[in-house]
Image (cartoon, grey):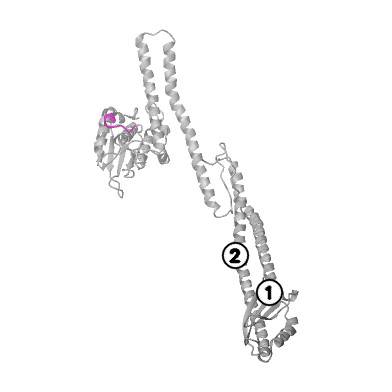
Amino acid sequence: MSADPMKPGYSIGRRLSLRLALLTMAVVGLTFWCTWNAVAMQLRNKNAQELEFRSAVITKMLTGTAAVGDEGAIRQKIESYAAMRDGTRIEIKRADGAVVYRDKDIAAHIMSEHFLTTRFTIDAPRVAGGKIDGAFSVDFAHDAAMGEKWAAVLVAATLASGVLIALGAWWQVRRELRPLHELARQTKTISADRLDQRLAMPGSAAELQPWIAQFNALMDRLQAAIEQLDAFNADVAHEMRTPIAALMGHVEVALSRERPAGELRETMAMSLEELQKLSSLIDDMLFLSHADRGARARRGAPRSLRTLAEQVLEYHEMPMEDAGLGASVSGDALVAVDDALVRRALSNLLSNAARYADKGSAVLVHIECPPGQGPDSARIVVENRGTAIDPQLLPRLFDRFFRAESSRTACQQQHHGLGLAIVAAVARMHGGRTLAESSGGVTRIGFELCCEGAHAATPPALPGSADEPRARAAATPSRPATAH
């Protein structure tokens, strides 16, 4: 199940503060735990040393007494020392287990749970069994209480440091996230009628600069695409308005009064011609739409591009003769291409060249393998002599509906400005690019076909990607072949 886009997400500041606080508490707590264990170890060592020292004193005292005295002397000696050993407990037994002496159960000699005991054996010639066994215990409740207090202090310090770090981190994170809130505010000001607005955050963090640059670049592309779309819609409306207006005029004239069948047939023929222009425009727009969605060309077995070019030239032979133009093909390349698409692109190039070539000149088709590219690559360039194209217009030649102002008069009734855009689409579908240059009265326009995608999976059928039976129709500039 996809997340609800309207549901508010988590707070980065709150999450960072909480995680930083938890991390701080974990680190500080681990440090304090290690410190507390080190202190506890030192206390245990101190207690063991103290027990050993006090036990040595008791043992030395009893050793001297037991060497010359009996049980009574031993008891008397221990009792005389009892007042000076609060927090301790001693018990003396004979070898047979009989108790010689045991401290009374008074407050000074009652042990808590925090005590240590050591045992010893002393020779006692005057006591039955010749030996006495002793157990000496020392209560370290005071040290244990001090350790517990330190533990409580360390735990409280850990919690307090976590809270303080969380508050400080929350304040610092909010302070550092202010540029993001400012970027959000600037983004809100961008609307459909204010696409020229861009994000600006001088002096912001280095991590934000790539995001700002990428967003502004995206807005540049979006603005250009919308402007191109607006221009495209305007051009489409303009191009479609002419044939539709002509159709309406023909029908209105035909319906204005009773007319003989011959006149009605002539009106229907003119209407059909306008419908064919409109259909050609729609077919070209559908083809470009498929190409824009990333469709790839269907490549067959490698074949001679010269053969394809000669087939297209054969179709254009009579129109060129009527225009007083010659045509020829030079060079060749064996490349795996979509035959129908290449014919269509080459036909558009030839139509474009013949339209603007000087009468009596020749249109030349050059085919070659581009240097430095793979064996399945080729370059097709159509050259004609005529008025040179303004260098500033060359980058726009392959835009949709683009026509130089000088060409809008005599030729705009014969073409609708999508021919070279289709050439660019065919080049993209073959992984190639377009070429255009014009100088000294010679204009060279063409495209490259690259080996990229030669073995890709077969894409969906595209307008203009027809099989061999449609080859001649695909070479027609005004009515491109379609395959659905």
**Image quarter in which the C terminus is found:** top left
Question: Which callout, 2 or 1, points at the residue further toward the start of the chain?
Answer: 2
* Magenta extent: 464-470
- Label 2 close to label 1 by CB (< 8 Å): no
**Left or right side of 229 for 97:** right
Residue 140 is labelled as 1
**Which dot marks residue 439?**
none
Q: Which amino acid does label 2 sit on?
A: Leu
Secondary structure of the residue carrying tag 2 is helix
Q: How far apart are marks 2 and 1 (CA)?
A: 26 Å
Left or right of 136? Residue 193 is left
Left or right of residue 326, residue 229 in this image: right
Residue 270 in the image: x percent, y percent? 37, 18
Give residue 262's position: percent from left, percent from top. Answer: 34, 11
Q: Name the residue under label 2.
A: 30
Q: Answer whether residue 266 is visible to the viewer in this image.
A: yes
